[in-house]
Amino acid sequence: MNRMKTLVSRRARLVLVIVLSMALGISLAVNLSGRDAAYALDRKATAQEHCAALHELQDAFTSIVDEVVPSVVSITSTRTVETNGTMPGLEEFFKNFPFPVPRPEVPGKQPPKTYGSGVIVRSEGYILTNDHVAGGAEKVMVTLKDGREFQGTVCRDPRSDLAVVKIDAKDLPAAKLGDSSKVKVGSWAIAIGSPFHLDQTVTLGVISATGRQASLPEGAGFYPNLIQTDASVNPGNSGGPLVNIDGEVIGINTLIQSPLGAANIGIGFAIPTNTAKFVLDQLITRGKVTRGYLGLVPEDLTPKRKALYGVKEGVFVNAIDLDSPAGKAGFQVEDVITEFDGKKVTNEIQFRDTVIATPPGRQVPVIIVRDKAQKTLTVTVGEAPPIETAKAPAEEPSTKLGFSMADITPELTKKYNLDEGAKGVVVTKVSIGSSAAQEGLRPGLVIVRANSQPITSVEEFNALTKDLKPGDTLRLRIRAKGREGLVAIVID
């Protein structure tokens, strides 16, 4: 009997465990099913939120484009040039090819057309573009977004590579010019223009860098301050706007860096809008641009120079035209300018802009540091002269320093057209690719000092430099045509 009761009791407990297990299983299944459903709903909701955010971002960009594109124009310029059997411009295009390319022969006079872009900056028909797009053209045609065409008249400023085209039209959609000094690296950038004659093309990228400098070959131009962007810029974009996410023009697209110079590789440059505003206002009101001028070459201070000259900020005077306002006021190579007309000098670009904006004829106090002592000079600001053409390239081989020199003789004075009575040693050869060549040393320059010591002969120069080791810096003070400058060469 007791055995029977025990068996029943065990069976009852087993049934209870099974029932409870089933209940727990059903409960877990229901809960997991509910969780999966909730997870699926959460994922769907998250995807919808992300999609909405992307649409919002997309709508922001399209609204910017809708606002700015009507102010962007296409420009076609016609120039008649003499050709020597080859189509104009092709030699420059083909010269970098690694293999021979047949050139089409088209001798005689040709009226080539160039295509570029521009941006309407005043509703009464003023368009801002590059000088290399419209300057010097016999005929300039402007095409608006709505298809209307106008012939324009050009007022140019080759020094900045900017020009203003005036067309006979009113109530045009003018773009807003922003403050390029507020541009930050990493911020969005939109380029609009007519690359390869494809009107109103829009590309997107970021600001890659600011304060870039660039020189074009054969004296075609020097850009002291450029905005770099990876927004795609190609031939035909020149003169078009670079825009921020507020729909403001922050730059005028100008050039690209490319192995063949023919297509974009993600390195484009634009002239800052603040520079364009300065040029634009003067071209419209006066027909030309007047700039303040000192006649010296400023450079940013490196940490080494700060330590060497005992300064914390300012700009370093690398070269001086001796007959210029700066030369007459007593400036010297290796001076450090710390204050100009009561304003602190912080860097090269800021100093250049300040000088340029100073009216010619004005007397300005300038604080400098020379031999680690502060001094005040007074300079009468001049007017910037026309752009000079580029100098001839350097010649070939030489010494361990990367160049060769000789004592000055009547024959060398005549050969290099040196100043009468020039003292020092004359550079005769410079090795291509050497540090000397990269720093601008070239035949015909006269070395008057080496590491602050006067030089009157090759023997003196060799004695002074014989102990220099790789990595040492050789500072050369050089003269040519009334200009004195500094060349710093790192010994290879």
Image: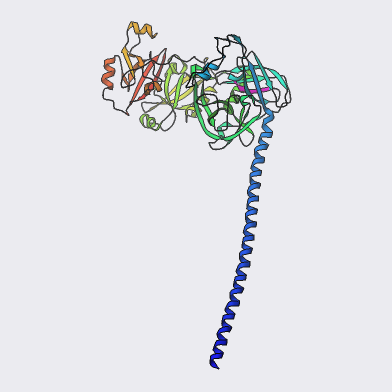
Q: Horizontal placement of 235 versus 467: left or right?
A: right
Q: Is residue 127 magenta?
A: yes
- Residue numbers of the magenta segment: 126-130
Asked whether residue 420 appears in the rendered view, the answer is: no
Q: Nearer the viewer, residue 103 or 79?
A: 103
| Quadrant of the image containing the C terminus | top left
Picture coordinates of residue 129, whole percent (x, y): 62, 23
Picture coordinates of residue 57, whole percent (x, y): 64, 42
Q: Nearer the viewer, residue 337 or 373?
A: 337
Picture coordinates of residue 29, whole percent (x, y): 61, 67
Residue ranking furthest to the bottom = 1
Asked if 311 appears above or below 50 in the picture, the reply is above
Asked whether residue 415 appears in the rendered view, the answer is: yes
Q: How many marks?
A: 0
Q: Horizontal placement of 198 versus 261: left or right?
A: right
Residue found at x 64% / y 60%: 37
Residue found at x 43% / y 32%: 313
Q: Nearer the viewer, residue 262 or 363?
A: 262
Q: Magenta span: helix, strand or loop, mainly?
A: strand
Q: Quadrant of residue 142?
A: top right
Picture coordinates of residue 97, whole percent (x, y): 49, 21
Q: Is residue 163 magenta?
A: no
